[in-house]
Amino acid sequence: MVSRIIPVEAFDLVVFGGTGDLARRKILPALFRRYCAGQMPEGAQIIGAARSEMDDAQFRVFVTEAIAEFNGDFPYKDEDMQGFLSILFYITVDALGDRGWTELAAKMQADRVRAFYFSVGPSLFGPLAERLHTYGMADMNTRIVVEKPFGRDLETAKELNRSLADHFDEHQVYRIDHYLGKETVQNLMAIRFGNMLFEPLWNSQYVDHIQITVAETVGVQGRGEYYDRAGAMRDMVQNHLMQLLCLIAMEPPSRFEPDAVRDEKLKVIRALDPVDPGDIVRGQYRAEGERQSYLEDVENPQSTTESFIALKLHLSNWRWAGTPFYLRTGKRMRARSSEIAVVFKETPHSIFDEEAGRHRNILTIRLQPNEGIDLDVTIKEPGPGGMRLVDVPLDMTFTEALGPDAEQVPDAYERLIMDVVRGNQTLFMRGDEVEAAWAWTDPIIADWEERGDKPLPYDTGSSGPVDALALMHRDGRRWREVRS
């Protein structure tokens, strides 16, 4: 099973913030891997644009070092590196002034896709969009890519949408969430809508509850100033976890097309009930040994921002009425793990005695690490002496199922950037989707701020505050163990 390489049409890609951390860690290495895979067409150009004083040669050295640092053990030939460097260029640009824009416009080639990646702060989205029009670089083949955070509340999200809509149509705007580019996340739709086995059971009649966990072992050091203004709710729940929830809960779209898929995701967000304050647990990690606490990492001893949050959610629609969704995410937890667990109900009547125990099927989609899918099924434990039941996984770990080909599966940024060039918005958020997510999120944040709630402390290397365990225990359920 070999991943097919589908060439894209000729393009110019400009990365604003081309010397920044995201470009260095993710964007440029991803583009290099696509070049090595043979997906870059003849005549493609990749142009870094930033305030830094740099020429083409210096930018190529910068990119070479970034690839060496962040591409891990990815194998490549010297001619691949030289070929990739030959399509790289750099122009010093002032996003708020006029410097560099004439030179950038002159670099654009006619009759090809033009993609502009805004790897910059949201405050620059509007000025960049305006200057692309002023200097004649925007036409119907132009696409712009914007990174999160897309606003910090509904009001700012609407303002950002307006600033982009002043210069570009919605079909030209690609709001990127790298979680949606993960192979396993996309497999959610394949599992649900490509297998008759699951879709008839994908409802409140058969599903007891659903858990979505995104746990990280790192703290917020290096991002303290930003994170203390955002917190886990804004940084993770409002976008990443919300998108996973939508893909799990959405109705089948009429066809696999961008707006058909995004219409169904929007319906999920709008069906979310307000969250009871008693169904929310927030936390901050404590210091451990030489590792600082959250308060020390953000240099704000009075901070009431959460580094952990767990919520119990409900959807008001026919498919999911009565089925709870449990979401949690946090920093400095026991292991780095992202997974979705669909926990099915127990059999209505067990023909086995009490010693056999109670069992249930669980479909687990592992997003990271060890991407894959497994389904817990109940079988008889081998051996004589009665009917003892045990749960075992039917496991499809990508690295095992695909063998050496698993290493060729593109990562999220590779796939998403190529989708921009193709003009495929299926895996990107639409403006009304973003605003609906903030409309649900804002009252939750406003409520705990009005009450003056403080996050609960939790130990580094734990599963979060003890109260998060109680969030499920009181319902007679348990969180799945956080493990890598």
Image: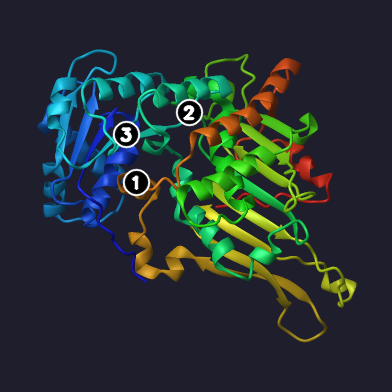
Amino acid type, callout 3:
Tyr
Write the residue at 36% across / 59% down: 409
Q: Nearer the viewer, mark 1 or mark 2?
A: 1
Measuring from the top left, give residue 436's x and y in whole percent. Answer: 60, 33
Measuring from the top left, give residue 166's x and y in whole percent. Answer: 39, 23
Nearer-the-camera pick, 164 or 80: 164
Looking at the image, residue 48 sits to the left or right of residue 422; the answer is left
* Residue beneath disc 2: 150
Nearer-the-camera pick, 409 or 308: 409
> Sequence order check: which comes first, mark 2 or mark 3?
3
The CA span between labels 2 and 3 is: 14 Å
Q: Are marks 3 and 1 in contact (CB under 8 Å)?
A: no
On the rendered image, what quadrant is the N terminus found in?
A: bottom left
Measuring from the top left, give residue 159's x and y in whole percent. Answer: 48, 20
The 10 Å Cα crowd at callout 3, few under 14, some 14 to 19, many 20 or more, is many
Above or below 246: residue 183? below
Occupied quadrant, residue 117 = top left
Q: Nearer the viewer, mark 3 or mark 1?
A: 1
* Residue beneath disc 1: 423
Seen from this angle, which residue lies furthest bottom? 384
Measuring from the top left, give residue 472's x and y in whole percent. Answer: 78, 45
> Sequence order check: which comes first, mark 1 or mark 2?
2
Q: Does residue 462 appear anywhere in the picture? A: no
Above or below 396: residue 71? above
> Sequence order check: which comes first, mark 3 or mark 1?
3
Helix, strand or loop under label 2: loop
Amino acid type, callout 1:
Gly
The 10 Å Cα crowd at callout 1, few under 14, some 14 to 19, many 20 or more, is some
Q: Does residue 467 appear anywhere in the picture? A: yes
Helix, strand or loop under label 3: strand
* Residue beneath disc 3: 117
Write the residue at 45% across / 22% down: 162
